[in-house]
Image (cartoon, rainbow, N blue to C red):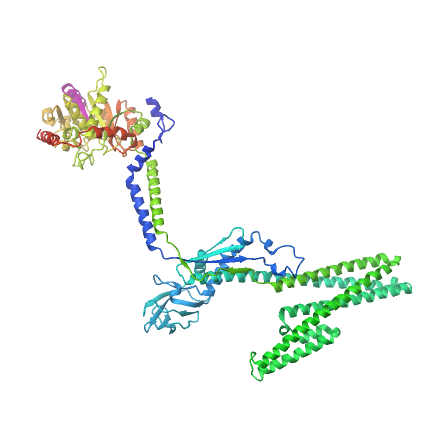
């Protein structure tokens, strides 16, 4: 079993190696052992939450709803061939509008429209406290300014800190500093100076974007928008401007797309018209060729008729295009946006007399109106001017009706000519020698004609879309104010406290995971492979008089002598019992060495109290302080250090001078003596061997206190003179690696290691808590007067001896 334990690698104890599964109480013990850390983190997070809540500004929320419609909805009646909805051009139209709404483009437009780059810097001030109708140019510097109120708050000066006035005037009137313009509001406090800054565009945009949120309503085309701010007046204004900016953005997007489509179709129509003209010229060339002139008179007549019919169809097409262009232009721009002379020129000789007369009358009315405005200095609202405008509007409607009538007439004649063309082609098929070539040319001409007509219809549709373009986002439920948001202070504090408990518990378990010290008997047996002979609880009966270090002036407390009923004294008795049961007739234990891996682990305390326990059993015991480097036992017993062991070994003192007899009943003490220059050589001398042999003849047990194993080689040298070694480990302080190296070093030189003493074990240690509680629960409690008197007499008897 011991070899298996020694072969186990350094690390966490294997849960499959026989150790019991952790109990819920074990986790509680870990938390209670590091309760200070949990409480500190809990206090810090709770205090931080309280501080954060106390620093919170009052927030206000403004809400608004918008409806996203179909961008092509208005064109449905005029454009029945459109089968694809405008909403289908997006992957998700509602989500697309939300992304646009929260974009930097919209936020920038809002910032510019409300002048939000201008911001107060005085504590507790918001935008609406000082400004309204603000505008800031893009070239405005990013600087600090002051707004100084004077004359009891009736006038104000806008300036740089300590500088001359950039603008000044009465409160409530616009101030213009060149790069910024705003109307100052009455001050919250009279005759004070308030800090103002013009922040960067990116900062202002990020503030707006960060506070706008949009959520779509399920199964509808509605979007609920909210804006949170510490300014209850500006919040609804920002929200309304955001929605309006989205409306304008959508209208601009549709108009731009329509204009691009119109431009593209017009370019394609130009190419199609050129191709159609080429086809007609090819037919004309064919007819004028030698083959065509050799035809019979009848054939010649049919060809001439076809040529004349084609020319007339082309003229009708041109007239229809002119009338269509004029009708569309008047619908979109009105007669005031047209050059009437150019319109009359475009109509040419085919102009209808009625249309010409209407154009002349409109031009005459326009001249009269200009004469009234320019020469007689009348306004457009004057009754004479309004009468002329009404006549112009009336004739404008008559002109539009005349154009539509002419357009319908042209389309009727065009349809009749095409019918004649079809009949003529049927008659021409009687000429076999020209049929194939002419049919090929006519087929190409028909294809070009069809392409041109298709593009013309698409142009009509694109122009309809361009004219019908308007905002497709409607604003519903405009905000009339803003509502205060519940700061949820109590909830935030509770969440902060809960977070503190979670972080504290996590930190406690994390530190427990990082802890590589020896804490429990399971640790000792797992990593060292030696039994635990005694578990010494933390010395709390002596108060602050506990071991502070091997050289501490406090010394090692005499727990057994001062308070025999203390749980620690009972633990030392258990240590004595375990060691005595290891002693046999063949291998008796008479000389015992106590050591530890490092200093401050309680080996001197253990050696002293163990010696007292042996002496109380009635045996003669010699306690030898063999720590020649940092002795401490003489201070615990209030005895002079010299003469002592060093003096005996070098021959400067006799045995009767060095050994202090009966420091306690049946207990003699040999102090360390003077400090030697070579402690290791002195302890390894023959004189030391003879002294041990002589002491074993006089005493039933010899207990030696030695220096730490890893610090010096004295313990290894002394171990050769003893029957065995007891390694003292301090729970929660001794590193596992240090304990392993200490035991390995003792075994390498052939020393017998009886076991370990686990010192300063806290009652909160999970593995030992159930064991230690019996020590504390079975002691007399509370004490009576007789018990206290007995304890006082025991202490007095100790010090008098």
Q: Position of residue 680 (x, y in %)?
A: 21, 28
Q: Is residue 258 left or right of residue 639?
A: right
Residue span colored magenta: 687-704
Q: Position of residue 521 (x, y in %)?
A: 29, 28
Along the viewing direction, whichever of 476 and 359 lies nearer the viewer: 476
As drawn, 388 above or below 643: below
Which image quarter: residue 622? top left
Q: How many marks?
A: 0
Along the viewing direction, whichever of 21 and 675 lies nearer the viewer: 21
Outermost residue, top direction? 586
Q: Is residue 80 left or right of residue 296?
A: left
Image quadrant in which the N terminus is located = top left
* Residue 801 inside the magenta-drawn segment: no
Q: Is residue 253 left or right of residue 58?
A: right
Which image quarter: residue 621? top left
Outermost residue, right direction? 296
Q: Position of residue 433 (x, y in %)?
A: 88, 57
* Residue 700 inside the magenta-drawn segment: yes
Q: Is residue 755 left or right of residue 556?
A: right
Q: Position of residue 609 (x, y in %)?
A: 18, 28
Image quadrant in which the C terminus is located = top left
As drawn, 152 above or below 575: below
Q: Main secondary structure of the magenta part?
A: helix
Along the viewing direction, whichever of 180 and 528 lies nearer the viewer: 180
Outermost residue, bottom direction? 376
Along the viewing direction, whichever of 624 and 324 lies nearer the viewer: 324
Residue at image location 69% in from the left, 61% down from the top: 457
């Amino acid at each position: 079993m011991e070899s298996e334990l020694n072969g186990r690698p350094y690390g966490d104890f294997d849960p499959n190696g026989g150790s019991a599964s952790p109990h819920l109480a074990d986790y509680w013990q870990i938390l209670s052992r590091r309760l200070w850390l949990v409480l500190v983190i809990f206090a810090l997070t709770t205090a931080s939450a309280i501080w954060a809540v106390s620093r919170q500004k009052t927030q206000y929320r403004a809400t608004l709803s918008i409806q996203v419609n179909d961008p092509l909805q208005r064109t449905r009646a005029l454009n029945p061939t459109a089968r694809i909805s405008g909403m289908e051009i997006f992957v998700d139209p509602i989500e697309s509008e939300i992304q646009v709404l929260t974009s930097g483009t919209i936020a920038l437009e809002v910032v510019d429209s409300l002048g939000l780059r201008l911001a107060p810097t005085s504590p507790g001030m918001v935008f609406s406290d000082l400004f309204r109708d603000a505008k800031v140019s893009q070239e405005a510097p990013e600087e600090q300014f002051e707004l100084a109120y004077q004359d009891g708050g009736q006038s104000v000066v806008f300036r740089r800190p300590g500088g001359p006035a950039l603008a000044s005037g009465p409160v409530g009137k616009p101030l213009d500093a060149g790069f910024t313009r705003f109307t100052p509001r009455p001050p919250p406090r009279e005759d004070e100076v308030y800090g103002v800054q013009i922040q960067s565009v990116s900062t202002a945009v990020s503030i707006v974007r960060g506070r706008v949120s949009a959520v779509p309503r399920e199964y509808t085309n509605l979007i609920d928008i909210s804006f949170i701010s510490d300014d209850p007046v500006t919040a609804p204004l920002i929200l309304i401007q955001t929605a309006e900016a989205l409306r304008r953005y959508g209208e601009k997007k549709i108009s731009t797309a329509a204009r691009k489509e119109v431009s593209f179709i017009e370019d394609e129509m130009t190419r199609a018209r050129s191709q159609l003209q080429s086809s007609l010229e090819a037919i004309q060339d064919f007819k004028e060729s030698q083959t065509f002139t050799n035809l019979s008179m009848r054939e010649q007549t049919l060809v001439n008729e076809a040529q004349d019919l084609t020319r007339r169809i082309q003229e009708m097409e041109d007239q229809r295009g002119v009338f269509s262009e004029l009708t569309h232009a008047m619908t979109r721009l009105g007669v005031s946006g047209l050059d009437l002379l150019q319109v009359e020129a475009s109509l040419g000789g085919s102009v209808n007399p009625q249309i010409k007369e209407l154009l002349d009358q409109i031009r005459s009315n326009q001249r009269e109106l200009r004469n009234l405005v320019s020469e007689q200095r009348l306004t457009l609202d004057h009754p004479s001017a309004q009468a002329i405008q009404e006549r112009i509007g009336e004739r404008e409607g008559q002109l539009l009706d005349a154009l539509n009538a002419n357009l319908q007439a042209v389309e009727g004649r065009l349809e009749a000519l095409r019918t004649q063309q079809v009949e003529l082609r049927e008659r021409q098929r009687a000429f076999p020698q020209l049929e194939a070539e002419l049919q090929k040319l006519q087929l190409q001409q028909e294809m070009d004609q069809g392409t041109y007509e298709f593009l013309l219809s698409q142009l009509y549709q694109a122009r309809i879309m361009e004219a019908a373009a308007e905002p497709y986002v409607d604003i519903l439920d405009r905000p009339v104010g803003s509502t205060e948001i519940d700061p949820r202070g109590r909830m935030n504090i509770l969440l902060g406290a809960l977070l503190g408990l979670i972080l504290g518990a996590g930190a406690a378990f994390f530190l427990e995971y990082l802890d590589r010290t020896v804490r429990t008997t399971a640790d000792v047996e797992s990593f060292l492979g030696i039994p635990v002979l005694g578990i010494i609880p933390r010395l709390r009966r002596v108060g602050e008089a506990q071991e502070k270090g091997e050289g501490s002036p406090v010394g090692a407390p005499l727990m057994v002598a001062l308070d025999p009923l203390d749980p620690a004294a009972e633990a030392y008795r258990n240590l004595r019992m375990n060691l005595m049961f290891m002693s046999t007739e063949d291998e008796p234990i008479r000389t015992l060495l106590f050591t530890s891996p490092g200093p401050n682990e309680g080996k001197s305390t253990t050696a002293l109290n163990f010696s007292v326990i042996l002496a109380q059993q009635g045996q003669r015991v010699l306690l030898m302080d063999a720590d020649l480097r940092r002795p401490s036992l003489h201070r615990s017993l209030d005895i002079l250090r010299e003469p002592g062991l060093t003096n005996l070994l070098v021959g400067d003192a006799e045995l009767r001078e060095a050994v202090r007899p009966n420091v306690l009943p049946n207990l003699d003490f040999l102090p360390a003596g003077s400090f030697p220059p070579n402690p290791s050589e002195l302890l390894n001398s023959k004189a030391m061997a003879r002294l041990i042999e002589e002491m074993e003849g006089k005493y039933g047990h010899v207990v030696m206190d030695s220096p730490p194993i890893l610090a010096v080689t004295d313990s290894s040298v002394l171990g050769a003179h003893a029957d065995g070694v007891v390694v003292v480990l301090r729970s929660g302080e001794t590193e596992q690696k240090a304990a392993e190296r200490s035991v390995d070093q003792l075994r390498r030189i052939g020393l017998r290691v009886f076991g370990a003493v686990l010192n300063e074990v806290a009652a909160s240690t999970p593995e030992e808590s159930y064991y230690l509680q019996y020590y504390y629960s079975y002691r007399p409690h509370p004490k009576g007067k007789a018990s206290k008197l007995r304890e006082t007499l025991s202490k007095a008897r100790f010090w008098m001896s």
